[in-house]
Amino acid sequence: MKKLVVLSGAGMSQESGLKTFREMGGLWENYNVEDVASYDSWQKNPELVMDFYNQRRKQLLEAEPNDGHYGIAELEEWFNVSIVTQNVDDLHERAGSTHVLHLHGELKKVRSTIDPDLVYTMDDWELKFGDKCEKGSQLRPHIVWFGEPVPALYDAIPIVQEADIIVVIGTSLVVYPAAGLVHYAKPDAQVFVVDPNRPEVAIKNVVYIEEKAGRGVDILKGKLEKLK
């Protein structure tokens, strides 16, 4: 089987009703997104940060995978598929994809504030003050905030390097370091970009599908069937 790697971003989940930061206008209840997505913010106003992620988590529990998620999962019948996603939702997994790496953390998980290796999956949407890890420290969202390192990036690079086919879907490719992953592709790798806004990719062998995720993945499958 050929190795196919999907690099997905916020546009992947847009049709599931999950708003992108761009759609929010960079704001949440009149706060800049940076005010709810950084460690400094967590220290200065933890109530605001916790509420932001609780609301995002609650919204996620009400959302369902869209046709794009299901279409990507079905590609496992033809290819050895790995997904490297900037998204913190679990819609890829819920659609049936079995190899998903989350670059920026996972919304349904929380972790210790003193030991980042202590990570827990939540059963509900609400994280509260007083919810502590086994070492007695407050739990925080398991999210990579602005200014924090992206440790999963080092796992993502070799995955991309092995790819025969790369699918970029729902990401503007302007947010680094995730945007730089596509440049680790093999010179002969075939690259497909699914996005109605046509983000430019400065590498060769690119096929653009200027559609949203659901319709775009359907078109993509027609093209990939010839490559399996």
Image (cartoon, rainbow, N blue to C red):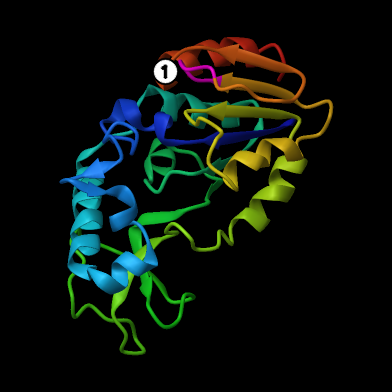
Q: Is residue 227 visible?
A: yes
Which structural element holds mark 1?
Answer: loop
Q: Please state if 216 lies on the left or on the right of 91 as rendered.
A: right
Query: Does the segment drawn in magenta span residue 5?
Result: no
Q: Amino acid at mark 1?
A: Lys
**Residue at the right extreme of this rendering:** 187
Report if residue 195 lies within the magenta region.
Answer: yes
- The correct choice, above or below, for 129 with respect to 217 in the image is below
Residue identifier under label 1: 212
Of residues 84 and 179, the one drawn nearer to the viewer in this rendering: 179
Q: Could you tell whether 34 is left or right of 117 in the image?
A: left
Q: Position of residue 192 (x, y in %)?
A: 63, 20
Q: How many marks?
A: 1
Q: Which residues are magenta?
A: 194-198
Quarter of the figure with residue 137: bottom left
Q: Residues within 10 Å of mark 1 (few under 14, many from 20)?
A: many
Name the spot of residue 99 as percent of width and height, x first: 56, 46
Quarter of the image for the C terminus: give it: top right
- Give above or below for 76 relative to 54: above
Relative placement, left or right, of 123 versus 201 is left
Quadrant assignment for the N terminus: top right
Quick one: 47 or 106, which is closer to the camera?
A: 47
Horizontal and vertical percent for residue 15?
32, 25
In which quarter of the view is residue 41 placed? bottom left
* Residue 103 image point, x, y percent: 52, 51
Q: Is residue 133 left or right of residue 79?
A: left
Q: At x 22% / y 68%, what residue is drawn?
A: 45
Residue 36, placed above or below residue 131:
above
Q: Main secondary structure of the magenta part?
A: loop
- Is residue 162 in sight in this rendering? no
